[in-house]
Image (tube, rainbow, N blue to C red):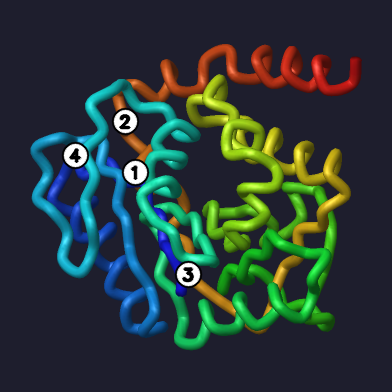
Amino acid sequence: MIDCIILSYARSRELHKMTQRAIDSLIADFDGVTVYVVETKDDAEPYRSAQTIYPKTEFNYNKFLKIGVSSGSNPYVFVLNNDIKAHKGCLKELMRWLDVYPSVSPVNPLLSQHREFKDVANEGYSIWMPGHLCGWAVMLKRSTIEMIGMDRLWDSRFKFWFQDNAYGEVLKQRGLKHALITTAKLDHYESKTLHGQENKQELTHDQKDSFDEWLGSLEN
C-alpha cells in the first residue's frame, strides 16, 4: 500500500548501514511497504529488502526524488531521508490520518527529539515549525501528486536546499494543508550524509537566488 522513497549517498560503510537501518525500520513497522532507494554512489552494494536504483546522472535531490516516486504505483507515498528510524506504528498512523482528513494530503510524523503537541493534527505551512518537513519524512497520497503534477511539486531547479520551501509554497497555492501527526513518531539523525561531504557548497550555492526567482514567478 505504501511506496517508501529513500535518497542515499553511501560514500562510507557507516552511511550504507544507516540507510539499511532506515529500510529495516520501515519493513518492521508495516507489512505493506515497498522501499525504493535512489543511491547516488553507483558502486554501492544493493540494499536488503529494497529496490536499489542507480541514476546515471548528476545528483539533484528533487530529480532523484521523482525517479523514486515514478518507480512505484502504490496509493500512498512516503518520502524520507536515509538518516531516520521509524517507531512502531508510525506508517499506519500516518495513513489513518490521511484518510481522516480528506483535505489534508501531506502529513509527517513527529520527530522524537521535539517536544510533544497536545493536538494530533497541528496544521500549517511554516517549514520551521517543529516537526514540519524536518528530515523529509512526508507521506502523501499518490492522487495528490498526480493532481499537482510531480514537476510542480518537486521542481528540479532545486538541487538540495530550498526544495522544502518551494514544496510548502506549492501546497499553499493549491489550498492544501500539511499536518503534523504527533501520534506517529520517528528518530532523525540530523543530516549525517551531508556532514563532511566535499561538494556541499556545490549543492547549496545560489539556491536562495533560485528560490527567490521561482517564488517571484508564482506571484506574478
Residue at position x 54%, y 83% in the image = 92
| Residue 101 position within the rendered picture, expressed as x and y whole percent measured from the top left | 80, 74
Q: Is residue 41 left or right of residue 21?
A: left
Residue placed under numbered mark 4 in the picture: 11
Task: Tell me the CA gap for discs 1 and 4.
Answer: 8 Å
Q: Where is residue 72 in the image (x, y as percent from the top left)?
A: 39, 56
Identity of the amino acid at label 3?
Asp
Tell me the distance, in whole angstroms, between the alpha carbons under discs 3 and 4: 22 Å
Classify mark 1: helix, strand or loop: loop
Residue located beneath label 1 in the image: 193
Whole-angstrom CA distance, mark 4 to mark 2, is: 9 Å
**Amino acid on which the number 1 mark rests in the picture:** Thr
Badge number at residue 187: 3
User: Pointers 1 and 3 in contact (CB under 8 A)?
Assistant: no
Q: According to the image, label 2 marks what residue?
A: 197
Question: What is the CA distance from the residue labelled 2 to the residue labelled 1?
Answer: 7 Å
Task: Report the front residue among 198 and 210.
Answer: 210
User: Could you tell me if the residues under marks 2 and 1 are in contact, i.e. CB atoms within 8 Å?
Assistant: yes
Lower position in the chain sequence, tag 1 or tag 3:
3
Badge 4 vs badge 2, beta-carbon distance below 8 Å? yes
Label 1: how many Cα within 10 Å (few below 14, some 14–19, many 20+): many
The front one of 40 and 96 is: 96
Mark 4, other Cα within 10 Å: few <14 / some 14–19 / many ≥20: some
Using residue 215 as the reference point, say whether residue 71 is left or right of it.
left
Q: Do the residues labelled 3 and 2 touch (CB within 8 Å)?
A: no
Mark 3 or mark 2: which comes first in sequence?
3
